[in-house]
Image (spheres, grey):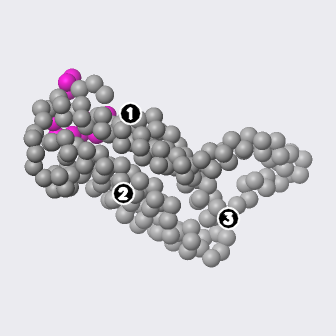
Amino acid sequence: MTKTQIIAKTILTVLGIYAVVTLYQFYPGQYVCSREEPHILREILSLSVFTVFVVLVAYFMSFKNNWLASKITGPGEQLTQQTQMVWLIKSLRIGLVFAGLMLLGRSLPTIMKISKTFFLIGSAFDDIAIYKSIPKVLILSYPEWFRHIYNFLKAILALYLICGAPHFIRWQVKHSPHYELGKVQT
């Protein structure tokens, strides 16, 4: 691989991650339901089909992108195996931190809401203990629950990517074509 192919591979990986997060934001099931509780079988089928589509996008953009990266950049000066691994690790770290920063900007309201929930725990316990009812904080419609869970997972992903996504980089390096055990430290 050349330096430009490695950079193209990194850009495709970052775009793949960003595409997955963005696609789940627009999951159609949360908008299709007209009632408070959706038909569970239809929802499971819809989520399964949508997940297969998103997994295919992630697979070809983030994991099997060597062919596309070489088509984008064309031929160039081939690097040694050791240099390829160093470039791959460094470019992936930079790209994933950048992706985490892009996601963090949209995750800040969620992080603020999570920090506010500690103040709502007292009123939730009051609702359970005194009034013997479900806490008002937990009474949400299906689309609201989906949106809260999605935003929470997106915030966690953003923080993981900002930390450099060490497990993901290790996995990418181990599955790259020129990886040899003992040669590369991630």
Q: Residue at x 50, y 40 (%)?
A: 159
Q: Residue furthest right?
A: 130
Classed neighbour count for the residue bearing mark 1: other residues with Cα under 10 Å, few (<14), some (14–19), many (≥20): some
- Whichever of labels 2 and 3 marks the residue nearer the N terminus, that label is 2
Q: Amino acid at mark 3?
A: Ser
Provide the residue designation for mark 1. 166
Q: Dominant secondary structure of the magenta stretch? A: loop
Give me the disc on residue 55. 2
Classed neighbour count for the residue bearing mark 2: other residues with Cα under 10 Å, few (<14), some (14–19), many (≥20): some
Q: Nearer the viewer, mark 3 or mark 1?
A: 1
Residue 180 lies in the magenta-colored region: yes
- Whichever of labels 1 and 2 marks the residue nearer the N terminus, that label is 2
- Rendered location of residue 87, percent (x, y): 24, 35
Q: State whether residue 136 appears in this view.
A: yes
Q: Where are the magenta residues, as a range?
A: 170-183
For numbered disc 2, what is the local secondary structure? Answer: helix
Q: Amino acid at mark 1?
A: Pro
Above or below for 171 versus 24? above
Q: State whether residue 39 appears in this view.
A: no
* Residues tagged 2 and 3 counted as in contact (Cβ below 8 A): no
Provide the residue designation for mark 3. 141
Query: Could you tell me how far apart the alpha carbons at marks 2 and 3 are, in whole angstroms?
Result: 27 Å
Residue 98 lies in the magenta-colored region: no
Q: Residue at x 78, y 45 (%)?
A: 120
Classed neighbour count for the residue bearing mark 3: other residues with Cα under 10 Å, few (<14), some (14–19), many (≥20): few
> In this rendering, would 87 be left or right of 127?
left
Q: Nearer the viewer, residue 40 or 46?
A: 46
Above or below for 127 versus 83? below
Q: Nearer the viewer, residue 39 or 166?
A: 166
- Whichever of labels 3 and 1 marks the residue nearer the N terminus, that label is 3
